[in-house]
Image (cartoon, helix red, strand yellow):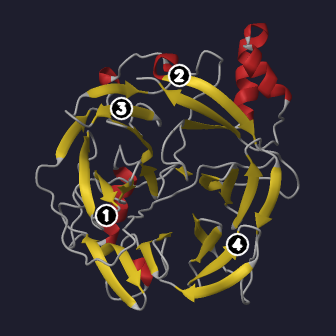
């Protein structure tokens, strides 16, 4: 039986504009701060179906070539589903879940990578980040090699034009150079600028991003971004070139401070001991922001807040929907900047278990999905429309 994991994505990608710009300190004045209690006593009691309306589902075809071991990233574009698999390859499905092809060029020669860390799509071109060499490989979507360029050794990246790349260098150590106290680097031709320095304010919360946190996501003409070990979320306006703080999330039980003087052993201890340390599944619908986080009472709690006034609309784990389908939100990248649906990634074992529990009272949809899968199938993608 294969193992499907929502593996670690402790990452940042800040999207910058296509024109040239210079980096400058980010202003944190007047940032909306929202305090969220992670305790069970503060949970709301909404039915999942009052928040999200079931839309459709996709069973990703499981063949010898398309069996997924570990999902590291999901990208939806041009009626295709791109899945970055833990086996250092990209598996491509159509929107009906049929396997189309895979991008798998592991090796040490031209056009090959040692470690496929991340990928990005611009028009009909795939950009593959080899975090070991390091370099960026360029392929057409029909898998034709188009060339390669040198890159930073980073955890993630975003292609920003012909000669511009933004990198997530995490603690700064990943790039292998002297600037080890910054989390973001912008490469323009041969010039590299660093931004978002780690300090007491930036590292005021010990979030270790995991699960399904994307590097960035589109929101109309802007990008929604997050930083590892930062309680703030950012917007990047494609016309301004600079990240602007959107909201600061103050989640209870996550109040350790890490500074430039904090030793590596102290940081490691903090990350292991912090009760609330995982932030994942970030979604934004107009003025409503949804974030998933881990609390001492549940590994999956979801808060929906109103960005206009900071009001907390929802703060609770999500129950199965009316069809008996577990709702496990997994953030993803979509080329579409308009309609944004919630994506739930469900392990086939969970569906089988739910069917067993429900028995004859199981919904027709749950029975239908169950007939198309077995314990060794790929995960099922379930989409919902946001109602509130």
Q: Earlier in the sequence, mark 4 or mark 3?
A: 4
Question: What x and y, as percent, mark residue 38?
Answer: 32, 33
Q: Would you name the residue on which mark 3 appears?
A: 304
Judge the density around disc 3: few (<14), some (14-19), many (≥20) Cα neighbours within 10 Å: many
Instruction: Judge from the rendering whether residue 178 lies leftward or rightward of residue 11; answer left or right.
Output: left
Disc 2 versus disc 4: nearer the observer: 4
Question: What x and y, as percent, mark residue 65?
Answer: 85, 58
Q: Would you name the residue on which mark 2 appears?
A: 319
Q: Earlier in the sequence, mark 4 or mark 1?
A: 4
Distance CA(mark 4)–CA(mark 3)? 39 Å
Judge the density around disc 1: few (<14), some (14-19), many (≥20) Cα neighbours within 10 Å: few
Kindly indicate whether the residue at mark 2 contacts the one at mark 1 (C-beta within 8 angstroms).
no
Distance CA(mark 2)–CA(mark 4)? 41 Å
Question: What x and y, as percent, mark residue 5?
Answer: 64, 49
Q: Residue at x 71, y 84 (%)?
A: 111
Q: Earlier in the sequence, mark 1 or mark 3?
A: 1
Disc 4 versus disc 3: nearer the observer: 4
Q: Would you name the residue on which mark 1 appears?
A: 239
Q: Examine the rendering and report whether any part of residue 172 can be seen.
A: no
User: The C terminus appears in which quarter of the rendering?
Assistant: top left
Q: Is residue 279 above or below residue 299?
A: below
Query: Which residue is the extreme one toward the left?
Result: 29
Secondary-structure class at tag 4: strand
Q: Earlier in the sequence, mark 2 or mark 4?
A: 4
Disc 4 versus disc 1: nearer the observer: 1
Q: Would you name the residue on which mark 4 appears?
A: 140
């Amino acid at each position: 039986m294969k193992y499907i994991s929502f593996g670690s994505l402790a990452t940042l990608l800040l999207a910058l504009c296509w024109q040239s710009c210079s980096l400058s300190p980010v202003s944190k004045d007047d940032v909306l701060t929202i305090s969220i209690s992670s305790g069970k006593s503060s949970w709301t009691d909404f039915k999942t179906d009052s928040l999200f309306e079931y839309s459709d589902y996709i069973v990703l075809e499981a063949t010898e070539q398309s069996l997924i071991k570990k999902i590291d990233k999901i990208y939806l574009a041009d009626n295709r589903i791109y899945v970055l698999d833990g086996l250092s390859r990209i598996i491509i499905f159509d929107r009906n879940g049929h396997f189309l092809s895979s991008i798998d060029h592991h090796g040490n020669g031209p056009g090959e990578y040692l470690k496929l860390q991340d990928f990005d799509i611009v028009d009909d071109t795939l950009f593959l980040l080899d975090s070991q060499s390091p370099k960026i490989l360029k392929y057409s979507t029909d898998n034709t090699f188009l060339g390669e360029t040198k890159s930073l050794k980073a955890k993630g990246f975003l292609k920003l034009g012909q000669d511009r790349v933004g990198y997530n260098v995490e603690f700064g150590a990943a790039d292998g150079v002297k600037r080890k106290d910054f989390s973001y680097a912008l490469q323009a031709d041969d010039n590299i600028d660093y931004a978002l320095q780690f300090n007491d304010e930036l590292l005021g919360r010990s979030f270790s991003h995991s699960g399904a946190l994307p590097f960035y996501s589109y929101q109309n003409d802007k990008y929604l971004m997050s930083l590892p070990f930062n309680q703030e979320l950012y917007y990047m306006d494609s016309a301004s070139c600079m990240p602007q703080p959107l909201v600061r999330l103050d989640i209870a039980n996550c109040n350790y401070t890490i500074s430039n003087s904090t030793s590596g052993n102290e940081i490691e201890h903090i990350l292991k001991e912090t009760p609330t340390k995982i932030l994942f599944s970030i979604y934004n619908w107009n003025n409503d922001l949804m974030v998933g986080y881990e609390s001492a009472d549940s590994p999956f709690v979801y808060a929906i807040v109103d960005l206009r006034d900071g009001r907390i609309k929802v703060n609770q784990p999500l129950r199965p929907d009316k069809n008996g389908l577990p709702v496990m939100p997994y953030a993803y990248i979509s080329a579409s900047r308009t309609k944004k649906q919630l994506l739930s990634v469900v392990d086939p074992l969970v569906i089988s278990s739910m069917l067993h529990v429900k028995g004859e009272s199981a919904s027709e949809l749950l029975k239908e999905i169950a007939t198309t899968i077995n314990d060794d199938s790929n995960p099922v993608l379930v989409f919902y429309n946001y109602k509130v």
